[in-house]
Amino acid sequence: MIKRKGTRKNKRKKDNNSQSGHTLKDVSSEMKNVPFSCIVKPVGARCNLRCEHCFYLDKDELYEPAPSGVMSDQLLESFIRDYIASQPPGAREVNFVWQGGEPTLAGLDFFRRALELEKRFAPSNMQVHNSLQTNGTLLNDEWGKFLADNGFLVGISIDGPEHLHNRFRPDAAGRGSFEAAMRGLKVLKRNQVEFNVLTCVQSDNSMHGGEVYDFLKSQGAAFMQFIPIVEHLDGPPNPLDPRPPESENVFRLTERSVSGEQFGRFMIEVFDRWLDNDVGSVFVQSFDVFLGLMLGYPSGVCVHSRRCGRGVVVEHNGQVYSCDHYVFPEYLLGSLQEGKSLRQMCDSSYQCAFGMAKERNLSRTCRECSFLTLCHGGCPAQWTDRGKHGEYGLNHLCAGYKMFFQHALPVLQAMGQALRNQRPAAEWKNYYTGVPETGAE
Ligand code: SF4
Ligand code: SF4
């Protein structure tokens, strides 16, 4: 049983007319052909740190009567069997994404069992991939060896050098977690575990984009993800009806939230540092995504996809939610414990409506924007602002996205042209015209 916390009441709406002219039924069947993925939380929201900008910590309070434990063996087995069986016919690979809270709190034996079950249920011609998102503080060489031996891709959270990382990432005793995270990073490097660094961009470190980038690079990070923190006091906008609570008439954000301009400046500083020396040797996820979109590839991230809703969360107790940013009672799709299959839940009419709401409820300002094909309005969980026509549903980060596109687009387009000519992106200068094909409004 779960109780409501930290969100306003969002009513599920019946709406059968999409603005693109397709009915919900049409798009639902289209959505069902898109493979889905699961983020699994083996210990729920439980974490050894108390990061102030973590949107997941208080999820523990959703569960009654006891705080979350570890996913049971029985549930783990049902989940792995079901997830593998839910892959589209002929699928040759499946990805398990282990996240938290802090998933290493589940212990190594939990993951050893998970791997045994993956081997047992996956057909011999299916490749199984595992990734783990961790704060790194509990890693030791036993973990390092296990992760390396089993080909895990590890995401480790580091928000910059010590003074920036420690600003919002204390442990349970209130001490900064930087040193412990650095020890974890050393474990990964020593054991040659494939890793990327995930950096939360909040109001504080957002003023230091170049410094953060230089630091991560100095630590050997060759793959970087920058995640803007937009933290709600009353729960995120409902993509199906992105209006603020009537009592407030605005979406209230915490002071730790990064503003659009701050995020834009941060990403521009990172981009300029990267451009100076690191094109082709350091990979920044969003730059890759924008480059891919310009070349006609689908977005590798839901945030910049036309639709979303194909990445659900599986909680430690078997409950399945629409998205990592929507682990609230209103977005509960069902439970593996009730015998519902993941495919049933992911293909339910509610989840299809949730996924297509991003396209259907996109603000008029976004629809008219010349950056739409790259941005796609960003994540609906950040649709807290009003657009230029006064409409609800504009992304809080819009100003930052625009700043970044205006700055980086001519270079990204030159890189795209180099790649189309079978040349490395690093040769972008040979293709640079300085004129963006897509201009600002
Ligand atoms: S709501 Fe945001 S995070 Fe969730 S699937 Fe959509 S774009 Fe992704
Ligand atoms: S840049 Fe702003 S207006 Fe344009 S698509 Fe993105 S969020 Fe919408």
Image (cartoon, rainbow, N blue to C red):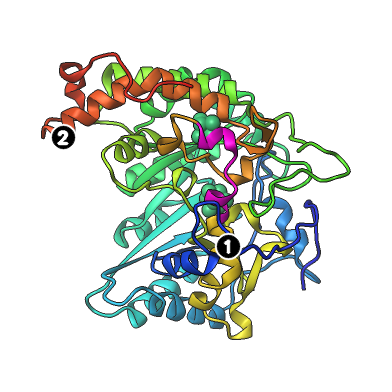
Q: Residues within 10 Å of mark 1 (few under 14, many from 20)?
A: many
Task: From the image, give the main secondary structure of the stretch colored magenta.
Answer: helix
Left of 217 or right of it: where is 253?
A: right
Left of 102 or right of it: where is 404?
A: left
Number of on-image labels? 2
Type of amino acid at the residue the image marks with label 2: Arg
Q: Circle 2 — which element?
A: helix
Mark 1 sits near ligand 1, with its Cβ under 8 Å away? no
Residue 84, x across and y down, in percent = 39, 76
Residue 262, x across and y down, in percent = 58, 21
Residue 66: tell me if it is visible: yes
Tell me what residue is drawn at x 49 percent, y 20 percent. Answer: 403
Q: Nearer the viewer, residue 176 or 133?
A: 133
Type of amino acid at the residue the image marks with label 1: Ala
Q: Circle 1 — which element?
A: helix
Q: Is residue 314 magenta?
A: no
The residue segment tinted magenta is: 357-368
In the rendered image, the vertical position of residue 60 relative to residue 236, given as above or below: below
Labels 1 and 2: the sequence-earlier one: 1
Q: Nearer the viewer, residue 105 or 206?
A: 206
The mark found on residue 353 in the picture is 1
- Residue situated furthest front in the rendering: 21
Q: Residues within 10 Å of mark 2 (few under 14, many from 20)?
A: few
User: Quarter of the image containing the N terminus?
Assistant: bottom right
Disc 2: which residue: 420
Are circles 1 and 2 on residues that touch, CB within 8 Å? no
Q: Nearer the viewer, residue 185 or 25?
A: 25
In the rendered image, the vertical position of residue 433 relative to residue 166, given as above or below: above
Residue 138: tell me if it is visible: no
Q: Nearer the viewer, residue 125 or 432?
A: 432
